[in-house]
Image (cartoon, helix red, strand yellow):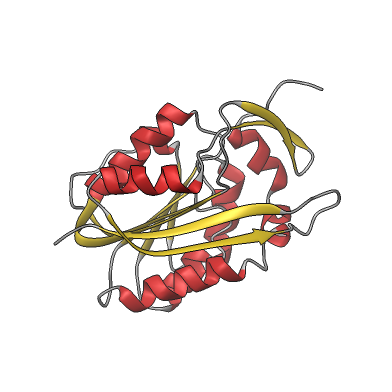
Amino acid sequence: MTGPASAADVFDALGKDYEHAFRNLAEQRAAITALAERLPAGAAVLDVGSGTGRPVADLLTAAGHPVTGYDVAPKMVEIARAQVPAARFEAGDMRELSFEAGTWDAITAFFSMLQLPRADQDTMIGRFADWLKPGGLLVFATVPADVDGVDIVFMGHPVRASSFPAEVLAEKLRATGLEIVREDQARFVPDHPGAGPEPHVYFTARKPS
């Protein structure tokens, strides 16, 4: 097997196949809907790892919230711009983003940190907390696992994955000062040949006012 591919290469290659494989994530839609209901009217949302724009930016813009999405894969940005013209999408590595403290009413990050080293995931969780306005909300989802730089095959592509167990992630969120207000765990089988069940965890955390 060849070495692990970059996230940009993987998701440029997958394009809408990724959206199709994960289109039935009921818990993701529930988390987005709950977020939209909690936000003030016209809340500014940052979507980190915005993919094809669906379902996150699509649902949130439909609810009246302006969304700015960033994705490391230029092809995903191209698809998202076509599919969700009401939102703004830009290509960029999340580790290179920079915002003033208290910029965003909400930040969403669905499964977008699995190819980052653990140290970078730690850094990003802290940045998310800093970028939120007081009272702002972070919705973060991942595949919880005690893995650090493990080579796997994801939808036919060799990748290097890292994550933390759900309880460790909860501790990391709380360590930034965020309060977890919602947590869901689920198992999901992507609609893709050879895919097996994978655990998912969804956190909604609030920055104190």
Residue 106: x percent and y percent? 31, 60
The image shows residue 82, relative to residue 115, as above or below, that is: below
Q: Quadrant of residue 153?
A: top right
Q: Quadrant of the N terminus?
A: top right
Picture layout, residue 21 above or below residue 126: below
Residue at far left of view: 209
Q: Quadrant of residue 208?
A: bottom left
Give the residue at x 29% y 48%: 174
Left/right of residue 147 with respect to residue 157 in the rendered view: left
Left-right relation of 197 to 102:
right
Expressed as whole percent of the image width and height from the top left, the position of residue 197 reads: 74, 54
Residue at image coords 54%, 65% = 28
> Which residue occupies the foreground of this view, 79 or 115?
115
**Residue at 19% over, 57% down:** 133
Residue at screen point 61% across, 46% down:
75
Across and down, in percent, residue 109 comes to 45, 52
Q: Is residue 167 above or below residue 107?
A: above
The number of numbered badges drawn on the structure is 0
- Name the one closer to the observer, 167 or 179: 167
Give 80 or 194, whichever is nearer the viewer. 194
Of residue 67 and residue 27, the one placed in the foreground of this image is 27
> In which quadrant will I find the C terminus?
bottom left
Whole-percent x, y for residue 200 in the image: 58, 55
Q: Residue furthest right?
A: 193
